[in-house]
């Protein structure tokens, strides 16, 4: 990035001061930055300190060491009102405002700009209107907040943060309670808002897949308290991603960009077939713990057939067995698992299957 | 699905209805005020009441005395107390985002009770009675002072704790614990006090709008008016607190300072009422709920004036009922407020899905 960072964090330590003891440091020496127009996702396993970091950046919680500069000025030096004019938040907690119309909640985002009475000027009304339009909830404006679905409610909260007209918008797990389509929609929306408004948006999330696809950059917080930043692909290629999420038997698979449970290793299976059916068959086999290899890679072979609008599978191992659903396929393969159970180990080169078919 | 029938308690209020509600609330207050002046152990026609208030010399002197020296200060006290308790309750419910909060959750009235108990109950053992009489502070005035000192002491402790506590809910629990401590100290005092002292302490806990003189009103009225105006000026930050501390902070509200101001405002109002009228329960928790339900809003710019009007009216009506018009007996005010009011609040709240959210 050529542009100077809007938010520049140097040597930040976050954690909790304990009276009479040394502070409990959650993460130390964090140096990262946010630039205008970029959508950044903050990723990290549970307990790594994502929420603590967000609270420290937004001055809800005191920092232990280091500096957070907003437009070159330490946020500790900002008066509350001025900080609120530059930085807005969307938090996980549900707000209980009941029959308050959505537009009223959104217009609360103008608080840092209005006088003591909270009266909205023409400019404030415009900002509220623009926020509703940008998030696409103009039609919800007069609806009471308690009647809205979780997805709609979250959009109202984003519109509220947007009405605050911030240079930096920070969202703490804002996608947590939404279903997948709504999460995808929200990610796209945030990306759009970052680009069109020339503002920086930071989202902490557990949606690794969506973050990898949508974020311009990632902030990756490891359980040991170290922070890395970079393009999602760089972090994957340098194995930073895998290291941050290394946990028990779960491993990050660089090739597929997703997590695999390495717990079960049922041996190798060759897969022959094309198209969507083959992709989903491959996923099913992998889920069941088989290592899927190409044709002739293993004595046991599953072949996918497309015929007359229906899909069927043939298990070849000397003889041949036909199956008509993936569930049936896995069921037929299961006795095989039983036979090889004794020889089961964590070694990827486990003995090839010798099914009794 | 939520129906949009006009009776639906969740449906937003049509803009045309709100002025009617304001008119109705004002009319209710005027009615209650007039009745309070007219009705009592002696019935005085409304026409004569108005004549007396207008300064007309036609009315009998005894009526003039009753209205001007007894009923008028009593009515004003009731109005001020109702408004103060409602506003203090609104403050606490919003600050703690808890529908069960009332003006006394922070232990303000417990502190006042302890002060009064010390003066009334311990007067016996320490011979304070004689000392107080010599200092011309016997009776009513000493109770007011004791309650004020007790309330201020608890407020001081709460504010000190608030400096150390980041989480507002922690403060709520600390306040409740203070309440338990003071009430157990009162129990111990009662154990060692004479029957007469116990009786006068228990009578004080019943609460009463009677007995506040014009002179005392010159202290009580400014306290309530300053407190209420202060809260109205804080309507904007109070609205922000509806979203919780973190959001309020992110919207530029200086949370700690505002929290202290909200607590001081509520303590001033609740403390003044407790000092002059005794620990009057129920109105403080009920009036804000009724106003939210009536006006279907959580906006404090609207709620504060509504609570003022409704709180004053309900306090007047409660006092009217407590006097049992047409008889010479009177009921404990605290018993009346709860006995009549609790079913009303239950009825209102049962119709809603979200108590605090109910606009």
Image (cartoon, coloured by chain):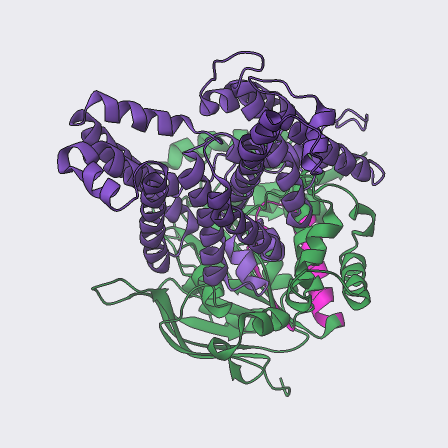
Chain colours: A green, B purple
User: In terms of depth relative to the viewer, which is nearer, A132 or B86?
Assistant: B86
Q: Residue at x 61, y 26 (%)?
A: B63
Q: Is residue B151 above or below residue B20?
A: below
**Residue A138: percent from the left, percent from the top?**
82, 52
Give, as a single range, the part of the protein colored magenta: A167-196
**Residue B269: percent from the left, percent from the top?**
48, 46
Residue A352, by quadrant, is top left
User: In terms of depth relative to the viewer, which is nearer, A55 or B347?
Assistant: B347
Pick the quarter of the image with the N terminus of chain B. Answer: top right
Q: Is residue A218 left or right of residue A2?
A: left
Q: Is residue B150 left or right of residue A325?
A: left
Q: Is residue B203 left or right of residue A289?
A: left
**Residue B170: percent from the left, percent from the top?**
37, 47
> Residue A303 colored magenta?
no
Q: Is residue B113 above or below residue B229?
A: above
User: In terms of depth relative to the viewer, which is nearer, A156 or B215?
Assistant: B215
Q: Residue at x 50, y 55 (%)?
A: B245
Q: Residue at x 74, y 71 (%)?
A: A197
**Residue A10: percent from the left, percent from the top?**
44, 81
């Amino acid at each position: 990035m050529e542009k100077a960072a809007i938010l520049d964090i140097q040597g930040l330590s976050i954690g909790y001061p304990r009276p009479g003891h040394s502070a409990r440091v959650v993460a130390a020496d964090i140096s990262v930055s946010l630039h205008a127009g970029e959508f950044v996702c903050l990723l990290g396993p549970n307990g790594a300190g994502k929420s603590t970091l967000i609270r420290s950046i937004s001055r809800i919680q005191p920092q232990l060491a280091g500096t957070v500069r907003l437009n070159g000025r330490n946020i500790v030096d900002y008066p509350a009102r001025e900080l609120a004019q530059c930085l807005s938040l969307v938090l996980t907690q549900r707000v209980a405002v009941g029959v308050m119309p959505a537009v009223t909640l959104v217009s609360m985002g103008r608080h840092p700009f209005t006088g003591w009475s909270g009266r909205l000027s023409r400019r404030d009304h415009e900002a509220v209107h623009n926020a509703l339009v940008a998030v696409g909830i103009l039609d919800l404006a007069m609806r009471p907040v308690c009647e809205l679905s979780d997805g709609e409610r979250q959009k109202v909260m984003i519109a509220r943060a947007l009405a605050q007209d911030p240079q930096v918008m920070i969202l703490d797990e804002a996608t947590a309670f939404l279903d997948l389509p709504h999460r995808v929609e929200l990610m796209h929306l945030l990306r759009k808002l970052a680009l069109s408004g020339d503002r920086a948006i930071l989202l902490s999330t557990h949606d690794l897949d969506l973050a990898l696809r949508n974020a311009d950059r990632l902030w990756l917080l490891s359980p040991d308290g170290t922070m890395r930043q970079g393009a999602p692909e760089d972090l994957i290629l340098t194995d930073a991603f895998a290291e941050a999420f290394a946990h028990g038997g779960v491993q990050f698979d660089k090739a597929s960009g997703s997590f695999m449970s390495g717990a079960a290793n049922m041996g190798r299976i060759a897969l022959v077939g094309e198209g969507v059916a083959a992709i989903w068959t491959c996923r099913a086999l992998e889920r069941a713990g088989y290592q899927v290899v190409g044709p002739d890679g293993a004595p046991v072979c599953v072949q996918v057939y497309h015929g007359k609008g229906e899909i069927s599978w043939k298990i070849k191992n000397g003889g041949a067995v036909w199956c008509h659903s993936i569930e049936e396929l896995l069921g037929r393969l299961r006795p095989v698992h039983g036979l090889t159970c004794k020889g089961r180990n964590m070694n990827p080169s486990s003995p090839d299957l010798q099914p009794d078919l | 699905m939520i129906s949009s029938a006009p009776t639906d308690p969740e449906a937003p209020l049509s803009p045309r209805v709100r002025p009617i509600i304001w008119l109705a609330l004002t009319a209710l207050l005027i009615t209650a005020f007039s009745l309070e002046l007219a009705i009592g152990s002696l019935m005085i026609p409304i026409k004569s009441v108005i004549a007396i208030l207008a300064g007309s010399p036609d009315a009998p002197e005894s009526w003039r005395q009753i209205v001007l020296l007894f009923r008028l200060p009593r009515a004003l006290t009731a109005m001020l107390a109702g408004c103060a308790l409602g506003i203090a309750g609104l403050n606490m419910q919003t600050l703690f985002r808890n529908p069960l909060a009332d003006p006394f959750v922070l232990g303000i009235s417990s502190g006042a009770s302890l002060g009064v108990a010390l003066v009334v109950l311990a007067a016996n053992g320490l011979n304070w009675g004689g000392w107080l009489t010599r200092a011309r502070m016997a009776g009513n005035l000493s109770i007011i002072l004791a309650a004020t000192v007790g309330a201020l002491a608890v407020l001081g402790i709460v504010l000190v704790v608030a400096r150390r506590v980041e989480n507002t809910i922690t403060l709520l629990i600390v306040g409740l614990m203070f309440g338990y401590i003071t009430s157990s100290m009162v129990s111990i005092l009662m154990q060692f006090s004479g029957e007469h002292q116990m009786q006068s302490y228990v009578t004080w806990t019943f609460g009463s709008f009677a007995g506040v003189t014009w002179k005392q009103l010159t202290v009580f009225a400014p306290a309530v008016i300053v407190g209420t105006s202060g809260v109205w000026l804080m309507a904007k930050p109070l609205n922000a607190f509806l979203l919780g501390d973190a959001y309020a902070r992110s919207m530029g509200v200086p949370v700690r300072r505002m929290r202290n101001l909200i607590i001081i405002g509520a303590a001033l109002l609740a403390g003044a009422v407790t000092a002059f009228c005794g620990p009057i329960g129920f109105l403080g928790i009920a009036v804000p709920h009724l106003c939210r339900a009536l006006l279907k809003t959580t906006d404090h710019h609207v709620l504060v004036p509504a609570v003022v009007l409704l709180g004053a009216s309900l306090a007047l009506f409660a006092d009217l009922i407590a006097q049992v018009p047409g008889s010479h007996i009177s009921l404990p005010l605290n018993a009346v407020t709860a006995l009549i009011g609790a079913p009303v609040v239950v009825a209102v709240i049962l119709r809603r899905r979200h108590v605090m959210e109910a606009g």
